[in-house]
Amino acid sequence: MNHPLPEELFDAARANDRAPFAAHLDVCAECRSAWERLRVGATLLDEASDDASLDAIDWSRIDAAVAAEGERVAAGIRAGSIRAPRPWKTYAMGGLALAAAASAVAYVRTHPSQDDLVARTDVTAPPAAQPVAQPSTPTPAARFDGAVLLAAGGATQTPPSGEAQRIASGAPLREGARIITTAVGRAVFSVQPAVALDVRGDSDVTLASLREGAATVTLAQGEVAVDRAGDTGSVALRAGRWQVGAEGDVVARVESHVVRVVVLSGRATVEADGVSQMQFSGPVVIELPDVGAPHAVPGEATDAKHVDLSMLSADGTMWALPPVDPAASLSVHGRGALPSSLEALRAPAPMTLQARLGRTIMTLEVGSGRVLAWHTSNVVAAAEPTVRRPPQHAPSAVQSPAPQGPTLNAMQLGIASRTAQGRFSHCFSTCREQNRCPTEMHGVIELAVDESGRVSLTALDPSANGARACLTNEVTHMRLPSAGAAYPFQVQLR
Amino acid sequence: MVMVSSNAPPLGILVSADDDAIPPYVARARGGDARSFQELYRTHRRDVARLVARLLGPRGDADDVIQEVFIQVFRSLVSFRGESRFSTWLHRVTVNVTLMHIRAAKSRPQLGTELSHEPSAPDDHSPVEGAARNERMRALYKILDTLSDKKRAVFILHDLEGTPAGQVATLLDIPVLTVRTRLFYARKEVYAAMVGDPTLESIAREMQGATASGGDEL
């Protein structure tokens, strides 16, 4: 006797269509019982699907508001004040980092309650959304030349009429320059006398306007941070149809369908297609979707990749640094972390960099007059060298119960678990070393395994977003036990 | 595989056979024709309203969301380049605006647990049946509010709206396999929550009974 598949039975029960299985249900008491019970659940969903709730809609109010908006937008289009935005995504597609996913940042440390978020968020609705002119580039008189403060991991700049050059060379950045960073790259440079722009890994940025008093930066891909040391000089970040005016410290990241902006301090004004939308006061996390309105979202308004730039200055000397193992963690005594792939920095005064690799600590004296070279200064004793501990955040794998698919036996599950651990562990350790992942990670990685055991990444907990590129790459080479049919698989982060 | 279908009429914006990539009134509206904005609104308002109402549940703030959807559609119309069907784009805007509204509502302080809008029971139900139905709907949407936006959207579009998984994938711009994965976890969470809800517990128990005897899925 061929029983119908559970999903088939569910679908038929949901549609209250007994006919396809009538003959079987007449003779199979087990399926008949299941059918009757499924119909109970289907009734609940039927109730939720009915249209009764449309009766309560006050159409007259909506009609009037929508008609007024239609008139306003139509007038704006005719007047030329509302135009189609530039297809910024195509620029990103043409970039060198085509396949690279926008690097993500984990905003950890503070966890404001949702109520706090609302209370602290100074949101101002647009005043009747009057059409205004398209976002205009400020036109101060003098050109401003940006000075490179820090370069790491192979960041390049391409002048408007010139060839790409490594930013570590210390050449000034001028209006129209395009900055592209590798996955481990980073470029920090001044865009105003007391304002630095921090371009993170896998990013594509163009200095659309760089003038005394005002700068406009277009973000096609990746993440940038505006770091303000004073109150002068305005910086506008453009991404897609959005423009964010930063009046404080801000981090902006382009994601698949949204621009995520972390306002760390001060205010940020948001415009869409030249129309003023809202003002937000930090700390707050806001999302600017491809379609729809900007909105604050619950989240930690912190910058996990923040680098203390106070020890750098555009007036200092640019130093090319001798290479060090990229796996090392770099820092300045008492002044915070630096990118591990650091190549050059501009220092106004001598400083001592520290590199830590495993149990080895090395130092580098910058600006002291000595030849720049790393010196091993200390070796940290292992705490308990005889104890082999699992790596921190090593993923533990569990198979998700499949809807109607196969299950893995204990041996297959063990193989799958070890495979996942072996493939993913280095992603998390590297991610943490490079300050792209928080110390605490949690949640799950959701995988989909096809009939032949090929794997694809279907979902990832936001806390592990910094490792997404590595994980995505790993799963393309990964094979999990084949179970004859597709099945979901979960890897627990802890 | 047989797709899920509901007894409710399907969304016109999903199944229109003559659904051009850029309908004439959209093209005219993009040129600044105010009357075409009205035509767009009149053509799609009930479909948008139905989807908004279903995504929101018995909250009573559907009016605001419907209005916001069309305001956003009007403002963004110049950026619609016809790379997808207009109906698909409209549906995406509707889902996004509604989910944003839900997210914002969740972040606001809750002054009470009562819903401002009483879901209306069909006319052929007695007052007692209607009240019970309202209780069930309140309980179901309270559970749906606990789902993540992604799972909630997939569950409602597929299991309540009857949209095939392939269309859900197109609308949400995600792979079909992801739709199925999210659907699986959404159902799992919904039915687990139903077991703990006094209003829906009996239904959940019966459904679990069916699971035990009929297979590993609802």
Image: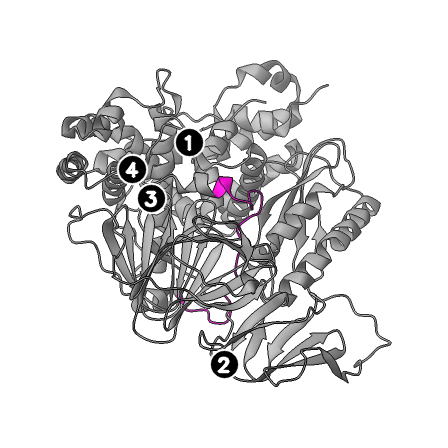
> In this rendering, does residue B129 appear at all?
no
Q: Residues within 10 Å of mark 3 (few under 14, many from 20)?
A: many
A406 relative position to B137: left or right: right
The magenta span reads: A92-113
Q: Nearer the viewer, mark 3 or mark 1?
A: 3
Q: Residues within 10 Å of mark 1 (few under 14, many from 20)?
A: many
The answer to which quarter of the image holds residue A407 is top right
Queried whether the magenta region covers residue A308, the answer comes back as: no
Which residue, given by chain and number where applicable, does mark 4 sit on? A84
Residue placed most toward the observer, A26 or A353:
A353
The chain that hosts pointer 1 is: B
The chain that hosts pointer 2 is: A
Identify the residue shown where x is 74% and y is 42%.
A477
Query: Colour scheme of this structure image?
Result: one colour
Residue placed most toward the observer, A298 or B8:
A298
**Residue A268 screen position, x and y as percent:** 31, 63
The chain that hosts pointer 4 is: A
Which residue, given by chain and number where applicable, does mark 3 sit on? B97
Which residue, given by chain and number where applicable, does mark 1 sit on? B161
Q: Nearer the viewer, mark 1 or mark 4?
A: 4
B190 relative position to A289: left or right: right
A13 relative position to A125: left or right: right
The answer to which quarter of the image holds residue B152 is top left
Instruction: Check disc 4 and give the amino acid type.
Output: Ala
Which residue, given by chain and number where applicable, does mark 2 sit on? A348
**Residue A197 screen position, x and y as percent:** 43, 64
> Mark 1 touching mark 4, by CB under 8 A?
no
Residue placed most toward the observer, A434 or A174:
A174
A143 relative position to B174: left or right: left
Give the dominant element type of the magenta stretch: helix, strand or loop: loop
